[in-house]
Amino acid sequence: MGCKYACFQDWSVSMGKQKRPALSAEEAVITEAGLKHEKKYLQSLKDRGVGVFEVPQQGTAEERAELTKAAMRKGKEVVYQAALYSHPWIGFADFLIKCDEPSDLGDYSYYPLDTKLKKTATADHLIQLSLYAYLIAQVQGKMPSEARIITGDGAEKAVYTNIAHYYFLEAKNRLENFIAGHYFPSQPDPCKHCSDCAWKDGCDQIWESQDHLCRIANIRKTQIKKLKDNDINTVTELVELDDNYNIKKLSSRIFQKIKKQATLQKHKEKTGKSVTELLPLEGGRGFNRLPVPDSGDLFFDMEGDPLYSDGLEYLFGVYYRSDGEDFKAFWGHNHEEEKAAFERVMLFFGEHLQKFPNAHIYHYNHYEVTALKRLSSRYGVCEDEVDDFLRRGTLVDLYKVVREGI
Protein backbone atom coordinates (compact mmCIF):
# COMPACT_ATOMS: atom_id res chain seq x y z
CA MET A 1 0.00 0.00 0.00
CA GLY A 2 2.72 2.45 0.94
CA CYS A 3 6.46 2.87 0.51
CA LYS A 4 8.38 -0.34 -0.18
CA TYR A 5 11.54 1.03 1.39
CA ALA A 6 9.73 1.92 4.62
CA CYS A 7 8.07 -1.50 4.56
CA PHE A 8 11.49 -3.14 4.29
CA GLN A 9 12.81 -1.04 7.19
CA ASP A 10 9.81 -1.97 9.34
CA TRP A 11 10.32 -5.65 8.51
CA SER A 12 14.00 -5.34 9.49
CA VAL A 13 12.94 -3.96 12.86
CA SER A 14 10.48 -6.81 13.40
CA MET A 15 13.26 -9.30 12.63
CA GLY A 16 15.60 -7.66 15.15
CA LYS A 17 18.03 -6.51 12.46
CA GLN A 18 17.85 -2.84 13.42
CA LYS A 19 16.12 -0.46 15.81
CA ARG A 20 13.33 1.92 14.94
CA PRO A 21 14.40 5.59 14.97
CA ALA A 22 13.66 7.49 18.16
CA LEU A 23 10.38 9.38 18.17
CA SER A 24 10.54 13.04 17.29
CA ALA A 25 9.11 15.53 19.79
CA GLU A 26 5.94 15.80 17.70
CA GLU A 27 5.60 12.02 17.39
CA ALA A 28 6.06 11.65 21.15
CA VAL A 29 3.24 14.15 21.80
CA ILE A 30 0.94 12.33 19.37
CA THR A 31 1.80 8.95 20.89
CA GLU A 32 1.09 10.25 24.38
CA ALA A 33 -2.21 11.75 23.24
CA GLY A 34 -3.18 8.45 21.58
CA LEU A 35 -2.42 6.48 24.74
CA LYS A 36 -4.41 8.97 26.83
CA HIS A 37 -7.37 8.60 24.45
CA GLU A 38 -7.14 4.81 24.70
CA LYS A 39 -6.94 4.85 28.51
CA LYS A 40 -9.90 7.22 28.68
CA TYR A 41 -12.05 4.73 26.76
CA LEU A 42 -10.77 1.86 28.92
CA GLN A 43 -11.80 3.77 32.05
CA SER A 44 -15.23 4.50 30.58
CA LEU A 45 -15.79 0.74 30.17
CA LYS A 46 -14.80 0.09 33.77
CA ASP A 47 -16.99 2.95 35.00
CA ARG A 48 -19.96 1.28 33.27
CA GLY A 49 -19.21 -1.98 35.09
CA VAL A 50 -18.00 -3.84 32.00
CA GLY A 51 -15.70 -6.76 32.78
CA VAL A 52 -12.32 -6.12 31.16
CA PHE A 53 -9.54 -8.68 30.91
CA GLU A 54 -6.21 -6.92 30.45
CA VAL A 55 -3.61 -8.98 28.62
CA PRO A 56 -0.25 -8.57 30.41
CA GLN A 57 2.38 -6.68 28.43
CA GLN A 58 5.13 -9.01 29.63
CA GLY A 59 6.13 -12.13 27.74
CA THR A 60 6.56 -12.97 24.08
CA ALA A 61 3.98 -12.15 21.46
CA GLU A 62 3.09 -15.84 21.21
CA GLU A 63 2.58 -16.09 24.99
CA ARG A 64 0.36 -13.02 25.01
CA ALA A 65 -1.61 -14.45 22.07
CA GLU A 66 -2.29 -17.62 24.08
CA LEU A 67 -3.57 -15.53 26.99
CA THR A 68 -5.83 -13.66 24.55
CA LYS A 69 -7.21 -16.93 23.16
CA ALA A 70 -7.88 -18.21 26.68
CA ALA A 71 -9.79 -15.02 27.54
CA MET A 72 -11.87 -15.35 24.37
CA ARG A 73 -12.71 -18.99 25.14
CA LYS A 74 -13.80 -18.01 28.65
CA GLY A 75 -16.13 -15.41 27.15
CA LYS A 76 -14.66 -12.32 28.77
CA GLU A 77 -16.75 -9.22 27.96
CA VAL A 78 -13.79 -7.16 26.76
CA VAL A 79 -10.18 -8.13 26.10
CA TYR A 80 -7.80 -5.17 26.34
CA GLN A 81 -4.45 -5.09 24.50
CA ALA A 82 -5.35 -8.32 22.72
CA ALA A 83 -2.49 -10.14 21.01
CA LEU A 84 -3.60 -11.95 17.85
CA TYR A 85 -1.25 -14.39 16.15
CA SER A 86 -1.41 -16.62 13.11
CA HIS A 87 1.99 -17.27 11.54
CA PRO A 88 3.49 -15.12 10.16
CA TRP A 89 1.03 -12.40 11.14
CA ILE A 90 0.61 -10.78 14.51
CA GLY A 91 -1.49 -7.83 15.57
CA PHE A 92 -2.21 -6.02 18.81
CA ALA A 93 -5.79 -4.76 18.96
CA ASP A 94 -6.70 -2.14 21.53
CA PHE A 95 -9.91 -3.98 22.44
CA LEU A 96 -11.87 -7.11 21.54
CA ILE A 97 -15.57 -6.65 22.25
CA LYS A 98 -17.88 -9.61 22.90
CA CYS A 99 -21.13 -9.69 20.90
CA ASP A 100 -24.11 -12.06 20.47
CA GLU A 101 -23.14 -13.50 17.08
CA PRO A 102 -22.45 -17.27 17.45
CA SER A 103 -19.07 -18.73 16.50
CA ASP A 104 -16.86 -21.72 17.27
CA LEU A 105 -16.47 -20.20 20.73
CA GLY A 106 -20.17 -20.67 21.50
CA ASP A 107 -23.20 -18.41 21.27
CA TYR A 108 -20.95 -15.36 21.12
CA SER A 109 -18.02 -13.96 19.18
CA TYR A 110 -15.71 -10.94 19.16
CA TYR A 111 -15.02 -7.93 16.98
CA PRO A 112 -12.05 -5.54 17.18
CA LEU A 113 -12.29 -1.97 18.43
CA ASP A 114 -9.46 0.55 18.16
CA THR A 115 -9.12 4.08 19.47
CA LYS A 116 -7.86 6.68 16.98
CA LEU A 117 -7.09 10.36 17.35
CA LYS A 118 -8.40 11.24 13.91
CA LYS A 119 -12.02 12.29 13.55
CA THR A 120 -12.76 10.01 10.58
CA ALA A 121 -11.71 6.50 9.60
CA THR A 122 -8.92 6.30 7.02
CA ALA A 123 -7.92 3.59 4.54
CA ASP A 124 -5.05 2.63 6.86
CA HIS A 125 -7.52 2.13 9.71
CA LEU A 126 -9.66 -0.15 7.53
CA ILE A 127 -6.69 -2.31 6.58
CA GLN A 128 -5.50 -2.49 10.20
CA LEU A 129 -8.95 -3.53 11.44
CA SER A 130 -9.24 -6.01 8.56
CA LEU A 131 -6.03 -7.67 9.76
CA TYR A 132 -7.41 -7.91 13.28
CA ALA A 133 -10.68 -9.34 11.95
CA TYR A 134 -8.73 -11.91 9.91
CA LEU A 135 -6.70 -12.96 12.97
CA ILE A 136 -9.81 -13.09 15.18
CA ALA A 137 -11.41 -15.42 12.62
CA GLN A 138 -8.52 -17.87 13.09
CA VAL A 139 -9.59 -18.22 16.74
CA GLN A 140 -13.40 -18.12 16.58
CA GLY A 141 -13.93 -19.69 13.15
CA LYS A 142 -15.78 -16.76 11.59
CA MET A 143 -15.06 -13.24 10.47
CA PRO A 144 -16.51 -10.50 12.65
CA SER A 145 -19.26 -8.78 10.70
CA GLU A 146 -17.97 -5.40 11.82
CA ALA A 147 -15.18 -3.58 13.58
CA ARG A 148 -15.38 -0.30 15.45
CA ILE A 149 -13.35 2.85 15.97
CA ILE A 150 -13.52 5.36 18.79
CA THR A 151 -12.48 8.55 17.01
CA GLY A 152 -10.69 11.51 18.53
CA ASP A 153 -13.95 13.30 19.27
CA GLY A 154 -15.23 10.29 21.26
CA ALA A 155 -17.67 9.05 18.62
CA GLU A 156 -18.01 5.29 18.06
CA LYS A 157 -18.10 4.39 14.38
CA ALA A 158 -18.80 0.99 12.83
CA VAL A 159 -16.74 -0.35 9.94
CA TYR A 160 -18.13 -3.32 8.04
CA THR A 161 -15.35 -5.80 7.46
CA ASN A 162 -16.63 -7.06 4.11
CA ILE A 163 -15.95 -3.62 2.61
CA ALA A 164 -12.17 -3.90 2.80
CA HIS A 165 -11.67 -7.66 3.29
CA TYR A 166 -10.74 -8.62 -0.26
CA TYR A 167 -8.52 -5.61 -0.71
CA PHE A 168 -6.85 -6.56 2.57
CA LEU A 169 -6.26 -10.11 1.30
CA GLU A 170 -4.68 -8.73 -1.86
CA ALA A 171 -2.44 -6.39 0.13
CA LYS A 172 -1.59 -9.25 2.50
CA ASN A 173 -0.55 -11.50 -0.38
CA ARG A 174 1.53 -8.71 -1.94
CA LEU A 175 3.41 -8.16 1.29
CA GLU A 176 3.99 -11.88 1.86
CA ASN A 177 5.35 -12.24 -1.68
CA PHE A 178 7.48 -9.12 -1.20
CA ILE A 179 9.09 -10.58 1.92
CA ALA A 180 9.37 -14.15 0.63
CA GLY A 181 10.90 -13.05 -2.66
CA HIS A 182 13.34 -10.64 -1.01
CA TYR A 183 12.28 -7.87 -3.40
CA PHE A 184 13.94 -5.34 -1.16
CA PRO A 185 14.65 -1.87 -2.58
CA SER A 186 18.31 -0.90 -2.51
CA GLN A 187 17.48 2.73 -1.79
CA PRO A 188 14.44 4.91 -1.01
CA ASP A 189 12.39 6.83 -3.53
CA PRO A 190 10.48 9.96 -2.52
CA CYS A 191 6.74 9.40 -2.16
CA LYS A 192 3.63 10.96 -0.64
CA HIS A 193 4.26 9.20 2.68
CA CYS A 194 7.62 10.92 3.35
CA SER A 195 6.29 13.82 5.41
CA ASP A 196 5.11 11.62 8.30
CA CYS A 197 7.50 8.66 7.95
CA ALA A 198 9.70 7.47 10.81
CA TRP A 199 12.52 6.77 8.34
CA LYS A 200 12.55 10.22 6.72
CA ASP A 201 15.75 11.49 8.36
CA GLY A 202 17.68 8.44 7.18
CA CYS A 203 16.30 8.78 3.67
CA ASP A 204 17.21 12.49 3.61
CA GLN A 205 20.80 11.59 4.50
CA ILE A 206 20.93 9.07 1.67
CA TRP A 207 19.51 11.55 -0.85
CA GLU A 208 21.93 14.25 0.30
CA SER A 209 24.93 11.93 -0.08
CA GLN A 210 23.73 10.97 -3.57
CA ASP A 211 23.00 14.56 -4.62
CA HIS A 212 19.58 13.17 -5.55
CA LEU A 213 17.34 15.13 -7.90
CA CYS A 214 14.50 14.94 -5.38
CA ARG A 215 16.30 17.61 -3.35
CA ILE A 216 15.31 20.24 -5.91
CA ALA A 217 12.40 22.20 -4.47
CA ASN A 218 9.01 21.48 -6.05
CA ILE A 219 10.34 18.99 -8.60
CA ARG A 220 7.88 16.25 -9.52
CA LYS A 221 8.50 12.51 -9.67
CA THR A 222 7.59 12.49 -13.36
CA GLN A 223 10.19 15.18 -14.03
CA ILE A 224 12.85 13.25 -12.12
CA LYS A 225 12.08 10.20 -14.26
CA LYS A 226 12.41 12.20 -17.48
CA LEU A 227 15.76 13.58 -16.35
CA LYS A 228 17.01 10.12 -15.40
CA ASP A 229 15.78 8.74 -18.73
CA ASN A 230 18.18 11.26 -20.26
CA ASP A 231 21.02 10.02 -18.01
CA ILE A 232 20.87 13.03 -15.68
CA ASN A 233 21.01 11.53 -12.19
CA THR A 234 22.25 14.25 -9.82
CA VAL A 235 21.62 17.90 -9.10
CA THR A 236 25.21 18.70 -10.08
CA GLU A 237 24.81 17.03 -13.47
CA LEU A 238 21.66 19.05 -14.08
CA VAL A 239 23.27 22.37 -13.09
CA GLU A 240 26.23 21.75 -15.40
CA LEU A 241 24.03 21.28 -18.48
CA ASP A 242 23.87 23.94 -21.17
CA ASP A 243 20.75 26.11 -20.90
CA ASN A 244 19.65 24.96 -24.35
CA TYR A 245 20.03 21.26 -23.59
CA ASN A 246 17.11 19.23 -24.94
CA ILE A 247 15.37 16.85 -22.56
CA LYS A 248 13.05 14.41 -24.28
CA LYS A 249 9.40 14.79 -23.22
CA LEU A 250 10.21 17.82 -21.03
CA SER A 251 9.40 21.30 -22.29
CA SER A 252 12.16 23.88 -22.49
CA ARG A 253 10.26 26.17 -20.10
CA ILE A 254 9.97 23.48 -17.42
CA PHE A 255 13.59 22.45 -17.91
CA GLN A 256 14.76 26.05 -17.46
CA LYS A 257 12.64 26.42 -14.32
CA ILE A 258 14.00 23.23 -12.72
CA LYS A 259 17.59 24.04 -13.70
CA LYS A 260 17.36 27.57 -12.31
CA GLN A 261 16.00 26.28 -8.99
CA ALA A 262 18.78 23.68 -8.81
CA THR A 263 21.40 26.34 -9.57
CA LEU A 264 20.16 28.61 -6.77
CA GLN A 265 20.18 25.73 -4.29
CA LYS A 266 23.71 24.73 -5.29
CA HIS A 267 24.84 28.32 -4.78
CA LYS A 268 23.42 28.27 -1.24
CA GLU A 269 25.06 24.89 -0.62
CA LYS A 270 28.50 26.16 -1.69
CA THR A 271 28.47 29.70 -0.27
CA GLY A 272 25.97 29.54 2.57
CA LYS A 273 24.22 32.56 1.07
CA SER A 274 20.64 32.52 -0.19
CA VAL A 275 19.90 34.09 -3.55
CA THR A 276 16.41 34.88 -4.78
CA GLU A 277 15.32 35.80 -8.28
CA LEU A 278 12.03 37.32 -9.31
CA LEU A 279 10.00 35.34 -11.81
CA PRO A 280 8.55 37.10 -14.88
CA LEU A 281 5.26 38.79 -14.09
CA GLU A 282 2.11 37.07 -15.32
CA GLY A 283 -1.43 38.33 -15.23
CA GLY A 284 -3.14 37.46 -11.95
CA ARG A 285 -0.16 35.50 -10.63
CA GLY A 286 2.73 36.14 -8.27
CA PHE A 287 3.13 39.77 -7.30
CA ASN A 288 0.22 40.65 -9.55
CA ARG A 289 -1.98 39.06 -6.89
CA LEU A 290 -1.13 41.89 -4.50
CA PRO A 291 -3.69 44.67 -4.16
CA VAL A 292 -2.73 48.32 -3.69
CA PRO A 293 -1.26 48.76 -0.17
CA ASP A 294 -3.45 50.46 2.41
CA SER A 295 -2.58 51.94 5.79
CA GLY A 296 -5.30 49.76 7.33
CA ASP A 297 -4.01 46.42 5.99
CA LEU A 298 -4.17 43.54 8.48
CA PHE A 299 -1.80 40.58 8.79
CA PHE A 300 -3.54 37.52 10.19
CA ASP A 301 -2.30 34.20 11.57
CA MET A 302 -4.00 31.34 13.40
CA GLU A 303 -2.69 28.50 15.53
CA GLY A 304 -4.59 25.29 16.21
CA ASP A 305 -4.25 22.09 18.22
CA PRO A 306 -5.25 19.10 16.05
CA LEU A 307 -4.97 16.74 19.05
CA TYR A 308 -7.61 18.55 21.06
CA SER A 309 -10.97 16.76 21.00
CA ASP A 310 -12.58 17.75 17.68
CA GLY A 311 -9.70 20.19 17.08
CA LEU A 312 -9.19 23.62 18.61
CA GLU A 313 -8.21 26.97 17.10
CA TYR A 314 -6.63 28.45 20.20
CA LEU A 315 -5.08 31.67 18.85
CA PHE A 316 -6.19 34.30 16.35
CA GLY A 317 -3.38 36.85 15.94
CA VAL A 318 -3.66 40.13 14.02
CA TYR A 319 -0.86 42.61 13.32
CA TYR A 320 -1.72 46.10 12.08
CA ARG A 321 -0.48 49.68 12.08
CA SER A 322 -1.86 51.95 14.79
CA ASP A 323 -0.85 54.68 17.18
CA GLY A 324 -1.11 52.27 20.10
CA GLU A 325 -0.82 48.48 20.13
CA ASP A 326 0.17 46.81 16.89
CA PHE A 327 -0.85 43.24 17.70
CA LYS A 328 -4.10 41.77 18.92
CA ALA A 329 -4.38 38.22 20.26
CA PHE A 330 -7.71 36.45 20.61
CA TRP A 331 -7.30 33.30 22.72
CA GLY A 332 -9.52 30.27 23.11
CA HIS A 333 -8.51 27.46 25.48
CA ASN A 334 -11.62 25.33 24.95
CA HIS A 335 -14.46 25.17 22.42
CA GLU A 336 -16.59 27.73 24.24
CA GLU A 337 -13.69 30.20 24.29
CA GLU A 338 -12.84 29.29 20.69
CA LYS A 339 -16.32 30.34 19.55
CA ALA A 340 -16.07 33.58 21.52
CA ALA A 341 -12.59 34.33 20.14
CA PHE A 342 -13.79 33.65 16.58
CA GLU A 343 -16.72 36.04 17.02
CA ARG A 344 -14.48 38.72 18.55
CA VAL A 345 -11.89 38.58 15.78
CA MET A 346 -14.61 38.69 13.12
CA LEU A 347 -16.17 41.70 14.87
CA PHE A 348 -12.74 43.36 14.95
CA PHE A 349 -12.29 42.70 11.23
CA GLY A 350 -15.70 44.15 10.44
CA GLU A 351 -15.22 47.33 12.47
CA HIS A 352 -11.67 47.83 11.18
CA LEU A 353 -12.66 47.41 7.53
CA GLN A 354 -15.44 49.95 7.96
CA LYS A 355 -12.74 52.48 8.90
CA PHE A 356 -10.43 51.25 6.12
CA PRO A 357 -12.70 50.04 3.28
CA ASN A 358 -9.78 49.50 0.89
CA ALA A 359 -7.76 47.41 3.34
CA HIS A 360 -7.12 43.66 2.99
CA ILE A 361 -6.42 40.79 5.36
CA TYR A 362 -3.15 39.07 4.50
CA HIS A 363 -2.43 35.47 5.54
CA TYR A 364 0.05 32.76 4.53
CA ASN A 365 -1.29 29.59 2.85
CA HIS A 366 -4.83 28.27 3.05
CA TYR A 367 -5.03 27.38 6.76
CA GLU A 368 -6.71 30.59 7.89
CA VAL A 369 -9.36 30.54 5.14
CA THR A 370 -10.13 26.87 5.75
CA ALA A 371 -10.36 27.42 9.52
CA LEU A 372 -12.63 30.47 9.23
CA LYS A 373 -15.03 28.56 6.98
CA ARG A 374 -14.98 25.57 9.32
CA LEU A 375 -15.65 27.66 12.43
CA SER A 376 -18.49 29.62 10.84
CA SER A 377 -20.09 26.34 9.78
CA ARG A 378 -19.51 24.60 13.14
CA TYR A 379 -20.97 27.38 15.28
CA GLY A 380 -23.43 28.86 12.79
CA VAL A 381 -22.07 32.38 13.32
CA CYS A 382 -20.38 34.95 11.06
CA GLU A 383 -21.21 32.89 7.96
CA ASP A 384 -22.25 35.95 5.94
CA GLU A 385 -19.12 37.85 6.98
CA VAL A 386 -16.77 35.02 5.96
CA ASP A 387 -18.62 34.60 2.67
CA ASP A 388 -18.36 38.35 2.06
CA PHE A 389 -14.59 38.30 2.65
CA LEU A 390 -14.20 35.48 0.15
CA ARG A 391 -16.38 37.04 -2.55
CA ARG A 392 -14.77 40.48 -2.28
CA GLY A 393 -11.21 39.15 -2.24
CA THR A 394 -10.55 40.67 1.19
CA LEU A 395 -8.36 37.71 2.16
CA VAL A 396 -5.01 37.66 0.33
CA ASP A 397 -2.83 34.52 0.39
CA LEU A 398 0.83 35.59 0.50
CA TYR A 399 1.99 32.00 -0.01
CA LYS A 400 0.64 32.08 -3.57
CA VAL A 401 2.34 35.42 -4.11
CA VAL A 402 5.72 34.10 -2.99
CA ARG A 403 5.41 30.71 -4.70
CA GLU A 404 4.50 32.24 -8.06
CA GLY A 405 6.70 35.34 -7.79
CA ILE A 406 10.11 34.16 -6.54
Image (spheres, rainbow, N blue to C red):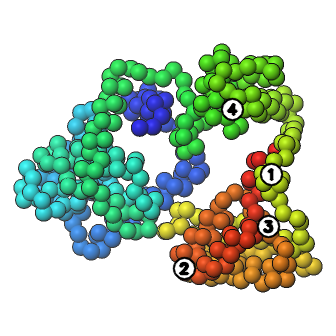
Dot placed on the residue nearer the N-terminal end, 1 or 3: 1
Q: Which residue is mark 3?
A: 299
Seen in the image, is 405 located left or right of residue 178? right
Q: CA distance from mark 1 to mark 4?
A: 30 Å
Amino acid under disc 4 = Arg
Dot placed on the residue nearer the N-terminal end, 3 or 2: 3
Observer-nearest residue: 139 or 343?
Answer: 343
Label 1 crowd bin: few (<14), some (14–19), many (20+), radius 10 Å = few
Q: Which residue is mark 1?
A: 283
Q: Which residue is mark 2?
A: 379
Residue 106 spot, x, y in % from top left: 6, 55
Q: Quadrant of the N terminus?
A: top left
Amino acid under disc 2 = Tyr
Residue 318 spot, x, y in % from top left: 77, 71
Q: Which mark is residue 92?
A: none
**Kind of element beneath mark 4:** helix
Q: Which residue is mark 4?
A: 215
